[in-house]
Amino acid sequence: MLPLKIGDLEVPMPVIQAGMGVQVAKAELAAAVAKAGGIGCISSVGLGSREASENDYLADSHEHLVKEIRSAKTLAPGGIIGMNVMVALSNYDDVIKTCVEEKVDVIVSGAGLPLTLPGLAKGSNIKLIPVVSSGRAMKIILRSWHRRYQYMPDAVIIEGPLCGGHMAFTENQVLHPELAPIQNILNDVRAELAPFEAEYGKKVPLLGAENVVTADDVLEKLNMGFDGVHVGTRFICTEEAGIDIKSKEIYVNAKNEDIIVLHSPIGLPVKVLRTPLVEKLLNNEKIPFGCPFRCLRACEAKAAKFCIADALLDTLAGDTEKGLYMVGSGIGRVNDIIPAEEFFEPLKKLV
């Protein structure tokens, strides 16, 4: 197993930790992953409190973002710290500006096409990593970045329909992942990259994102032709993840048959565990909310049946009646809560 090279960054373990929002992936988790040799990522969404966000969301978000970045760097000196920034965020430009000012190492950007990212990060040495789910999305990003900025992605994360989070797949593809196998997406993305790699004289590392729970899963993705992996669900059930232990236990006790596909307030399919909140949504109930963050540009707050940020704050607090438990398809194989470093121990024997 070779180190992952992204420009002038050499990552000993070819693993990027996913930026799971609303305080799952904060400084403590990102630092633990970075210290273990991977890339630790802080999620930029939902870092503040309900009360402060209602008063001044932009200022509160900026304050907590700076705090988390600096804390992660202190906890993992010399480690590689990144930021996961969803394109769908209402304060996307402000978050990228803060990342540049605080000199994070990596920005991972998905949940939309990050077409303006190179311009926002111009003048920095931050590695820019878009997240794509198809060759078509890759083509759009490549053409836009080349035409507007003469810039190539420093790496690309390729999501398959088995991954968690907001996904750019149809509900049918999420329910029937065999319709969009990640190997085919890898081949399509590689074909789109080839002429740009030749023109720029630059090889772009590709990272696979779906169903990675163990070291064997990492090796499987490497054997498929990926240069590394992007891991989310396994890291939710770690000691360093930010949510309450009661919520971690919901994940640990879950089985694959507990997974339900919902449409989030921004219209994208998302896999969640069947819980009391989800049962209400499936029964077409509307959950009252006050929109504490105003965080998503495309959110149809007036028409939405629930506030995803509100529900994830309940997950953070361990309110298993009101919480929302977003998940990837590998949850049935996540049966314990471990230190994040433990995920890397089998991999270190292969270096």
Image: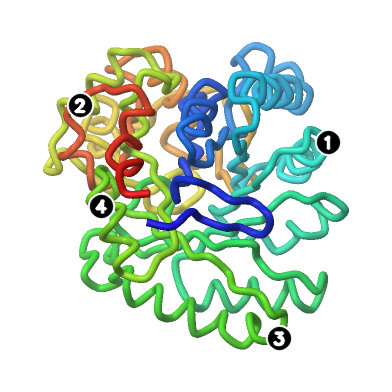
* Mark seen at residue 101: 1
For mark 1, does the 10 Å Cα neighbourhood hold few (<14), some (14 to 19), or many (20 or more) residues? few
Residue 115 position in % (x across, y down): 70, 64
Q: Residues within 10 Å of mark 3 (few under 14, many from 20)?
A: few
Kind of element beneath mark 1: helix
CA neighbours of label 2 inside 10 A, class few (<14), some (14 to 19), many (20+): some
Residue at mark 1 to residue at mark 2: CA–CA distance: 38 Å
Which quadrant: the N terminus? bottom left
At numbered mark 4, what does the secondary structure look like: helix, strand or loop? Answer: helix
Q: Residue at x 16, y 39 (%)?
A: 333
Point out the tag, 2 or 4, that comes first from the N-terminus. 4
SS at mark 3 in the image: helix
- Find disc 3 in the rendering and name its residue: 199
**Residue kind at label 2, given as amino acid type:** Val
Q: Amino acid at mark 3?
A: Glu
Circle nearer the viewer, 1 or 2: 1
Question: Residue 217 got which mark?
Answer: 4
Residue at 20% from the left image edge and 26% from the top image edge: 252
Nearest to the observer: residue 93 or residue 206: 206
Amino acid type assigned to the residue bearing label 1 in the image: Glu
Alpha-carbon distance for marks 4 and 3?
Answer: 33 Å
Compute the Cα span from label 3 to label 1: 31 Å
The answer to which of marks 4 and 3 sits earlier in the sequence is: 3
**Circle 2 SS class:** helix
Q: Are marks 1 and 2 in contact (CB under 8 Å)?
A: no
